[in-house]
Amino acid sequence: MLKKIKKNHPLADLTTFKIGGPAEYFIEISAKEELQETLAWAKEKNIQVSILGGGSNLLISDQGVKGLVVLIRNEKLSVHGERMIVGAGVSLAKALSRAISCGLSGLEWSNGIPRATIGGSIRGNAEAFSCSMSDIVETVEIFDTKKNKFEILSCNMCFFGYRKSIFSANKNLIIWEAVLKMPCKDKKQIEELVEKSLEFRLDKYPNLPSAGSVFKNLDPQKIKKKNPLFFDREIKNKVGRQGLVGAGLIIDLLGLKGKTIGSAKISLEHANHIVNTGRATADEIAQLISLIKTKARDNFKIDLREEIQYLGF
Ligand SMILES: Cc1cc2nc3c(=O)[nH]c(=O)nc-3n(C[C@H](O)[C@H](O)[C@H](O)COP(=O)(O)OP(=O)(O)OC[C@H]3O[C@@H](n4cnc5c(N)ncnc54)[C@H](O)[C@@H]3O)c2cc1C
């Protein structure tokens, strides 16, 4: 076994939910050669590999994760004019802080999102307030586990969409580094947006461990097609800025705000957040998710899709 690999490594504290069992094998990787060597080892031993970023969009099973969990720790960060070269393991907070000091705009929306890394955020095309990672990604350096080599993808090749990218569709691609193109802006303007973003989150988000929004927002046309009466009565006038219907609205309409199973609770502040009020288990969170999905389907003919990712299920 490679020297740095640990066995039965606890993962709960590496997630914002603070939930989940250990990784069978675990390694933190900060150098390219190490990544290549580790993946070769896992391939040879036929060990399944999972990638961990900041753990802010993850539900890890109570039983833990079989195989090898790789925590990407590439913390490279440098600025060259309007370009930021940033490792996948750099937190959004750190990248934002450097952007502010250099007068670069494009990450203001992320202020107040805990732990999220550049890698996880590119994978899910993280966004808020109509700004997203895809607006600033110029290129992404990836390791393709099938081809066993590093490659550079342009933004177009990443096929970004709402909460998706080529990386969410293809698990063989590990994000290693990115070049972000961020326009120069007046520092005061940047700081104002950064403040606003934090204020919004402090006001709207629960102050307990969560993984952010559990479900993706919805296309209003799909709701209209399946359930026109419900659409006219409850949804028509509540379509959000991006032309989507908040999943939180649907959960709220189901009367599920505050619903609790064990120590897992649907937040009273934001119905699309499930919080860990103490010692919640992954099983309790999963039960709440399943309850919401069943009720949304049975009552409103709506198929809610998870935004959070599962590990070890
Ligand atoms: C309080 C709170 C508020 C939030 N608000 C927002 C918000 O406003 N907007 C938003 O978009 N999200 C939000 N989130 C969700 C979350 O922060 C984002 O989805 C974030 O981008 C996930 O990044 P991460 O590094 O934590 O990824 P993780 O949770 O560690 O992983 C998520 C997925 O990405 C994969 N992954 C991670 N790193 C890599 C890599 N290097 N290469 C390939 N795959 C990788 C993992 O395998 C997993 O499938 C919020 C979360 C919390 C807790």
Image (cartoon, grey):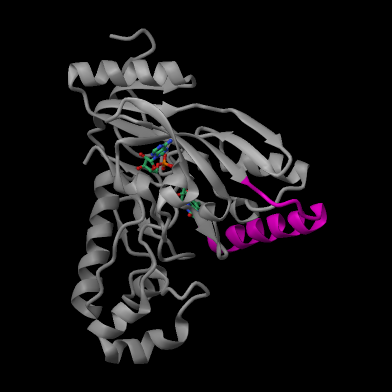
Please state which of residues 175 and 249 is positioned toward the viewer in this rendering: 175
* Image quadrant assignment for residue 97: top right
The magenta-colored residue range is 181-206
Q: Is residue 241 visible?
A: yes
Q: Is residue 25 left or right of residue 54?
A: left
- Identify the residue at horizontal 17%, vertical 22% (top origin): 46
> In the displayed structure, would residue 257 be above or below residue 103?
below
Q: Quadrant of the N terminus?
A: top left
- Identify the residue at horizontal 60%, vertical 58% (top origin): 202
Q: Is residue 56 visible?
A: no
* Residue 236 percent across, percent down from the top left: 41, 87
Q: Is residue 269 left or right of residue 147?
A: right
- Identify the residue at horizontal 75%, vertical 59% (top origin): 192
* Image quadrant assignment for residue 215: bottom left
Q: Quadrant of the C terminus?
A: top left
* Residue 146 percent across, percent down from the top left: 27, 30
Please state which of residues 252 and 137 is positioned toward the viewer in this rendering: 137
Question: Is 277 part of what is drawn in magenta?
Answer: no
- Identify the residue at horizontal 78%, vertical 59% (top origin): 189
Question: Is 204 part of what is drawn in magenta?
Answer: yes
Q: Is residue 184 left or right of residue 282?
A: right
* Image quadrant assignment for residue 244: bottom left
> In the displayed structure, would residue 106 be above or below residue 149?
below
Q: How many numbered marks have been drawn onto this rendered protein structure?
A: 0
Provide the major secondary structure of the magenta segment. helix
Please state which of residues 128 and 40 is positioned toward the viewer in this rendering: 40
* Residue 5 percent across, percent down from the top left: 35, 14
> In the displayed structure, would residue 1 be above or below residue 146?
above
